[in-house]
Image: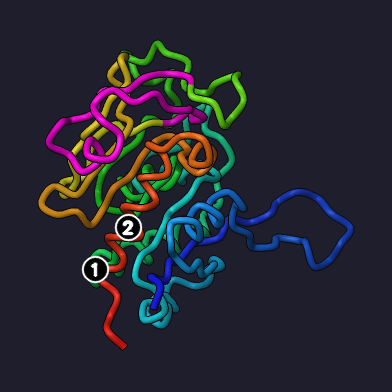
Amino acid sequence: MRPRIALPADTLDEATNIINERNAAFAPRPAVEAIVKAGGLPIILPSVDPSDVADYLPLFDGVAFLGGFDVDPTFYHEEPHLRLGKTYRKRDLFEIELLRQSVAQNKAILGICRGLQLINVGLGGTLYQDLSEDPTAELKHSQAAMGNQPSHHITVDPTSVLSDLMGVRPYVNSRHHQAVKDVAPSLTAIAKADDQVIEALESTNSDQIVAVQWHPENMYKHHEESRQIFVNFIQRAAKRTPNL
């Protein structure tokens, strides 16, 4: 059986006259395709009540937390900063519970952009609500270049899972205005941009969680390093797939 990968859905919040598109749940097509190409079977999960998470757990072997709105800062005990972007508390509540139960059940976990931030917050870390709060941030982290093109380099810990996939000095794309501030106790910062903004996190004592601040789903077709992130994720999920 192919590893089954849960994709917690984003929510369409744009005004529309089409009733079936109002607040529709969706997953980004590039992420779906990257999972399929790497050998996984995507399962899109809408943001339902967190009490329903336990019923979802038997359906998947790994979960990818993807991009989207800012994480509500009250989850890390802060009030909203002047430059905080749009938030959606219902999604945060569902995904944080999904994360915690997935960690407890040893599911393979991938985080992308907001997904990295959600993972950090859900496990007890904090964020800079806007990079203007970070005294070290001086690079352009919300690129003007096309989204499938790299824009800045990062330095990766050579002992990390990520370094095996991308090397120690990969060139990545960048579309974020928030960043990790305090790293959650069970995670380790394993990559940084040259201005010291944290660009990737991993589980401290296992390969369960790999999370990146950039968007490899937009680069995997033409950048082998990005494709390897998804290949590794499916391999990690496959180790957790029961023999049926």
Q: Is the residue 79 above or below the residue 56 in the image?
A: above
Q: Residue furthest bottom?
A: 244
Type of amino acid at the residue the image marks with label 2:
Ile
Residue at the image position 21 percent from the left and 43 percent from the top: 161
Give the mark count. Answer: 2
Asked whether residue 114 is drawn in magenta, I would say: no
Q: Amino acid at mark 1?
A: Lys
The image position of residue 167, as x and y in percent, is 25, 30
Give the residue at x 63% y 59%: 26
Displayed quadrant of residue 109: bottom left
Q: Is residue 127 left or right of residue 132?
A: left
Question: Helix or strand or loop: what does disc 1 sit on?
Answer: loop
Decide if residue 204 is on the left or right side of residue 34: left
Identity of the residue furthest to the right in this view: 17
Q: Is residue 83 above or below residue 244?
A: above
- Residue 159 rendering spot, x and y as whole percentages: 12, 36
Q: Nearer the viewer, residue 44 or 10?
A: 44
Q: Quadrant of the N terminus?
A: bottom left
Q: Which residues are magenta?
A: 151-178
Q: Is 174 a magenta residue?
A: yes
Residue 27 position, x and y percent, is: 59, 57
Confirm or deny contact between disc 1 and disc 2 (CB under 8 A): no
Q: x and y percent of residue 83 in the render?
A: 53, 26
Q: Residue 239's mark?
A: 1
Residue receiving disc 2? 109
Disc 2 crowd rating (10 Å Cα; few below 14, some 14-19, many 20+) is many
Q: Is residue 138 left or right of residue 91?
A: left
The image quadrant that residue 106 belongs to is: bottom left
Q: Is residue 7 above or below residue 48?
A: above
Q: Residue at x 70, y 60 (%)?
A: 23
Determine which quarter of the picture holds residue 225.
top left
